[in-house]
Image: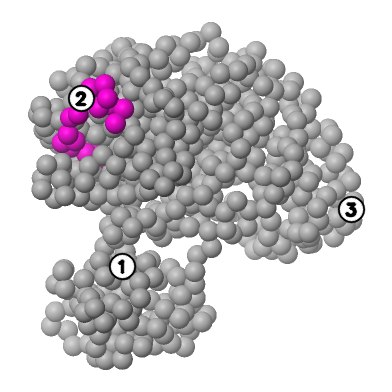
Amino acid sequence: MTTSTEPSELIVESQRRAATTLPFADTADLADADRGFIAALEPGIVTAADGTVVWDNDSYDFLREPCPASVHPSLWRQSGVVVKQGLYQVVEGIYQIRGLDLSNMTLVEGTAGVIVIDPLICAETAAAGLALYRAHRGGRPVTGLIYTHSHVDHFGGALGVTSAEDVAAGRCPVLAPAGFLEHAVAENVYAGTAMARRAAYMYGAALPRGPLGQVGAGLGQTTSLGTVTLIAPTVDITATGQQETVDGVRIVFQITPGTEAPAEMNFYFPDHRALCMAENATHTLHNLLTLRGALVRDPHVWAGYLTEAINLYARDSDVVFASHHWPTWGTDRLVEFLSLQRDLYGYLHDQTLRLLNQGHVGSEIAELIALPPAIENAWHTHGYYGSVSHNVKAIYQRYMGWFDGNPAHLWEHPPVESARRHVEFMGGADEVLRKAQVSYDAGDYRWVAQVVNYVIFADPDNQAAKTLQANTFEQLGYGAENATWRNFYLSGAYELRNGSFGTPTTTNAPTMLAALTVEQIFDAMALRVDGPKAWDMRVVTDWHITDENRIHRLELRNGRLTHYDRPDGVALPDPDASFTLTRPILIRVLLSGADFGALVSSGAITPGGDPTKLADIVGVFDQPDPDFAIVTP
């Protein structure tokens, strides 16, 4: 492993200037983050059954030291607050587990047991959090499970706090916003490989911890690496104002689709005067388009739902809490907190639209926008996770798409061909690197990153280019207030120096696949077809799904899989092959790599017609690559 660079004098001076302008006199967050503390997990490490460490909060002990020059002072402060871990009381009857994963787990005590809200990313951290709660509040059974929204850090630990048997028996209802299951599964399966690979950069999961490495992710410290699980909801929340009583606890829900997630909800506990904002209002500017990739979120809708939450619930609340960070107490304080969050997203939306209607493109608007002083001077509006820069570009993308209207950008060469031409025009690799070094010494790191990238993509074996680019990424990372930008830059530098670290996390957990609908199973298949390889193939198969009493037809033609339920009363051509099986067996044979012959022999699959046609279809599948290159071609 090669050595990282130290921060340059330009970065050191930049950090010093930032430290003099930040509102360090405002220490309310520090008091709020410590309020209600009961006990920490000692040591702050969670392991899997085989002893593998899936979470190590103690690896961030260095954050207790004074801020080094290699970390933006605002990010150092944020990480120092986020890293606090343990069991906390929010109000009487409501508790939180913080610092044991990227997200928080909230526990609400009911008549007979405890309701769990958002059981972290993996079963191991969720179980450790529940055990910490029980050690101090007694061995209450889990009598309810609530998912605030469809991202994995809010449901992945489900089997760490309850069981499928308890849910099936009605002992533990599972509540989620309408559309939860569809979006939770689609995000992690359809583009799961690419998102997970980029998430490794975004969260810095493979980076060494320390002042020259990963110091956090802004929203939480990083992602845990344990077993991702999922239990399907049993109660859908479909409308704002819907009330449910779970284990004697009254809950009033607010549906907020299209905000931080496609399926998301806030909710209010009237008997506790407590408002849960899911991930719609946290102590950071959130992402409108995450660096790992996602659908672009709607800040106009987001701001509208925050206004609705203020008017419906906030003025009758004593505390607001979320599934990340720490609560805010006091009616006036929490109303102002939510109002500033609302103004933040609304301002970015409106000003981006104003400027794009004057002809500015996204990259220009990102440089033009400045936040109002009242927003800029609040810690919780700073871009530790999202940023003004990439959020503005996301808003532009949402309305205008990838094309900025300039015909010169309509049909540019792809990265490698473009890089070769750039390098040739600029006098060759040696001349580009010579000039780039001059720019590096002058501190023009943004330009160096752009031009040296041309050399790397034109000549991937050019070690001098890789070294200079790694140095450049490190300086950009050291100077970033945004944790995900820092992690992206430092991850790129790490891979340029040491080679690919792959994808530390997995998205195709068995319980995730088990939640796929029949339509999603075949959609996932369709996304793996190598189109050109299948251009001349025509195969029709029928799938008799016995546990759903339906026949689903699959047609491969013109390089595409089309699928649909066979309509009643319509005469269709006979299939080339048919297969009778259950949906779980369908998942095993098509997505989990189970042995087809063994399943036929066991009676789990009954084939008809020419079953070798399935092999023809599978033969044109591509395999996703969780180790694809990012900073090299």
Which residue sits at x=31%, y=12%? 330
Residue 605, image x and y in percent? 24, 79
**Which badge, 1 or 2, is on the more N-terminal residue?**
2
Label 3 environment density (alpha carbons within 10 Å; few <14, some 14–19, many ≥20): some
Q: What residue lies at 20% left-to-right and 50% top-to-bottom?
A: 164
Q: Which mark is residue 430?
A: 3
Is residue 596 placed above or below 449 in the rendered structure?
below
| Label located before the other in sequence (3 or 1) | 3
In the structure shown, which secondary structural element does the residue marked by tag 1 occupy? helix
Please say if the residues under marks 2 and 3 sit with CB atoms less than 8 Å apart: no
Q: Which residue is the site of mark 1? A: 587
The residue drawn where x is 85% and y is 41% is 437
Q: Nearer the viewer, mark 3 or mark 1?
A: 1
Give the left or right position of residue 568, taking residue 285 as reference: left
Callout 2, which amino acid?
Answer: Gly
State the SS at label 3. helix
Query: Vertically, is 478 above or below 512?
Result: above
Q: Position of residue 126 (x, y in %)?
A: 33, 37
Residue 138 disc label: 2
Residue 64 visible in the picture = yes
- Crowding at dot 1, Cα within 10 Å, few <14 / some 14-19 / many 20+, comes out as many
Tags 1 and 2 touching, CB below 8 Å: no
Picture layout, residue 326 above or below residue 244: above
Residue 134 within the segment the image draws in magenta: yes
Residue 165 percent across, percent down from the top left: 16, 49
- The label shown at residue 15 is none
Magenta range is 131-147
Label 3 – label 1 distance at C-alpha: 53 Å
Q: Is residue 51 magenta?
A: no
The alpha-carbon separation of the residues under discs 2 and 3 comes to 68 Å
| Relative vertical location of residue 566 with respect to residue 199 in this rendering, above or below | below
